[in-house]
Image: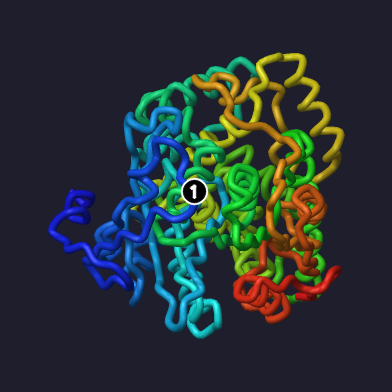
């Protein structure tokens, strides 16, 4: 019904649209064979509110000045005359003389670019970026407003999975993982959908979006996993790039085992930084890792009742990790752990809910399902048990005595990707980006989720300029740090890169 409402009864115009107007600004730039109708399609921009479907979109989609549309793309780019799917778009138009569109992706995979763009638009409302660019966020295929949406577990199945004891045998874990893969295929629209949700296809969608927006070249900001999308776009369409800012990088050459070790180590360092901050504060009740582990061990024996729900050890660990993404949430983590020590798990459960995409009405967003689905086609599957055992051993040895590894130790079982019904469409590799213009990579020294070295490696791999941010948090651009924001703004507006070796301090 929403799709029908958005696509009916509108007049076609050129230039700057208002609510309910349509615009045809493409095709722009080179058009791959057979894709003319997609690159030159009309976009109809209307109020975003009818598309709101979760807590965050309901909060942001009514913001003044944001408009939404649906982009049509092929499900399978090898079959451009076959089945089509829709990509949700949100735009906040430039307030002054426009340079072009600034497309953003917040990462995940699985996070909504539409809600992220609406939130960023609020933060940068009075800046030069808001004046010079239409800020555009999109929900990658399978996510959020985009349809078909990736669906794996029902809401009740997700709730149940979060409080069930960890599987004690490899066989039990593998049975659950196999069932999960089957449910994803069944509930997401079949194997053909799952085969075409990877980063390779999202990059192609982004080129269709670039053309439909009327931009000869793409200007893009990608955070976290969004840096992988940006890298894939740079490799597929180097000549179509105007500017790329890649913040919180995913290393294009890193294998999943090394990535897991890096993340576990990164979160441990962030926990150390939090505890050092917490130690001298009287408001902090849980001041050391030993006490924190004791609380989680108690939850492993018996989850804590929170109303009609329960806080499990797994959820508590997730809640702690969620609060370690930025030092801005350390105060909330301190309060949550202090409450837990007194028998109240509600605040940690809220942190876990926010991370896992559980809304206040008990429904879940597509974030966690999409994260698995994209990973399973972005990485080669491992079906050899000896290889799985070796990978588990390497992770355990590489993260010995770490908090994250101790509280949630890996099991040498085949994961859901081993049972995925379709093959992978990508894998870690050296990007080939001949003809790519200068790019900007931002990496944070204390980033818990995407370690600093990943940004160093990405900048080297694509020949980009590296900006180092000294702080403990995940991503930084357009979040209020003047040094980083000024450097990124000058690059996006004027294509002037910051000085080589620039370091900004948080």
Residue identifier under label 1: 30
Task: Let me know if residue 317 appears in the view.
Answer: no
In this view, 133 is above or below 83: below
Camera-nearest residue between 395 and 444: 444
In this view, 252 is above or below 480: above
In this view, 67 is above or below 485: above
Packing grade of label 1 (10 A; few <14, some 14-19, many >=20) is some
Quarter of the image that includes the C terminus: bottom right
What residue sits 64% from the left and 19% below the top? 169
Q: How many marks?
A: 1
- Looking at the image, residue 381 sits to the left or right of residue 186; the answer is right
Camera-nearest residue between 235 and 182: 235
Residue 20 sits in quarter: bottom left
Residue 148 sits in quarter: top left
Helix, strand or loop status at disc 1: loop
Give how far across and how far down residue 103 sits, in percent: 51, 61
Give how far across and how far down residue 302 sits, in percent: 58, 40
Give how far across and how far down residue 498 sits, in percent: 76, 73
In this view, 484 is above or below 58: below
What residue sits 67% from the left and 63% below the top? 475
Task: Let me know if residue 433 appears in the view.
Answer: yes
Give how far across and how far down residue 73 sits, in percent: 38, 42
């Amino acid at each position: 019904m929403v799709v029908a409402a958005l696509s009916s009864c509108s007049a076609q115009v050129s230039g700057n649209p208002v609510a309910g107007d349509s615009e045809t600004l493409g095709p722009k730039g080179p058009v791959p064979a057979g894709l003319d109708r997609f690159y030159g399609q009309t976009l109809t921009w209307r109020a975003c509110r009818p598309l709101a479907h979760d807590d965050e979109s309901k909060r942001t989609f009514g913001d003044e000045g944001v408009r939404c549309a649906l982009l049509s793309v092929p499900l399978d780019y090898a079959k451009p005359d076959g089945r089509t799917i829709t990509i949700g778009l949100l735009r906040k138009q430039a307030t002054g003389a426009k340079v072009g569109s600034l497309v953003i992706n917040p990462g995940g995979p699985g996070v909504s670019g539409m809600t992220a763009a609406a939130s960023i638009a609020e933060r940068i409302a009075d800046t030069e970026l808001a004046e010079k660019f239409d800020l555009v966020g999109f929900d990658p295929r399978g996510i959020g407003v985009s349809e078909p949406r990736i669906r794996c577990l029902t809401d009740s199945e997700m709730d149940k999975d979060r409080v069930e004891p960890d599987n004690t045998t490899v066989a039990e874990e593998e049975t659950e993982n196999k069932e999960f893969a089957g449910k994803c295929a069944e509930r997401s629209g079949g194997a053909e959908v799952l085969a075409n949700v990877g980063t390779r296809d999202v990059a192609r969608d982004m080129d269709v979006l670039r053309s439909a927006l009327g931009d000869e070249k793409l200007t893009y900001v990608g955070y976290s996993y969004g840096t992988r999308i940006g890298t894939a776009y740079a490799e597929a369409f180097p000549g179509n790039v105007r500017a790329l800012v890649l913040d919180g990088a995913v290393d294009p050459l890193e294998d999943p085992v090394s990535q897991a070790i890096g993340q576990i180590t990164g979160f441990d360092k962030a926990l150390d930084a939090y505890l050092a901050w917490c130690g001298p504060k009287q408001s902090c009740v849980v001041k050391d890792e030993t006490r924190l582990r004791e609380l989680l061990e108690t939850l492993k024996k018996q989850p804590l009742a929170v109303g009609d729900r329960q806080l499990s050890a797994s959820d508590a660990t997730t809640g702690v990790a969620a609060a370690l993404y930025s030092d801005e949430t350390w105060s909330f983590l301190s309060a949550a752990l202090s409450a837990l020590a007194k028998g109240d798990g509600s605040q940690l459960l809220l942190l876990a809910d926010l991370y896992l995409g559980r809304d206040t009405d008990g429904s879940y967003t597509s974030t966690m399902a999409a994260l698995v689905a994209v990973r399973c086609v972005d990485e080669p599957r491992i079906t050899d048990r000896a290889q799985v055992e070796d990978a588990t051993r390497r992770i355990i040895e590489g993260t010995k005595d770490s908090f994250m590894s101790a509280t949630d130790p890996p099991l040498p079982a085949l994961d859901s990707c081993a049972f995925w019904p379709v093959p992978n469409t990508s894998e870690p590799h050296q990007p080939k980006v001949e003809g790519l213009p200068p790019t900007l990579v931002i990496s944070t020294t204390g980033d818990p989720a995407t370690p600093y070295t990943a940004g160093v490696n990405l900048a080297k791999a694509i020949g980009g300029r590296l900006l180092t941010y000294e702080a403990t948090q995940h991503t930084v651009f357009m979040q209020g740090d003047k040094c980083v924001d000024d450097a990124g703004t000058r690059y996006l507006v004027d294509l002037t890169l910051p000085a080589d070796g620039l370091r900004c301090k948080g």
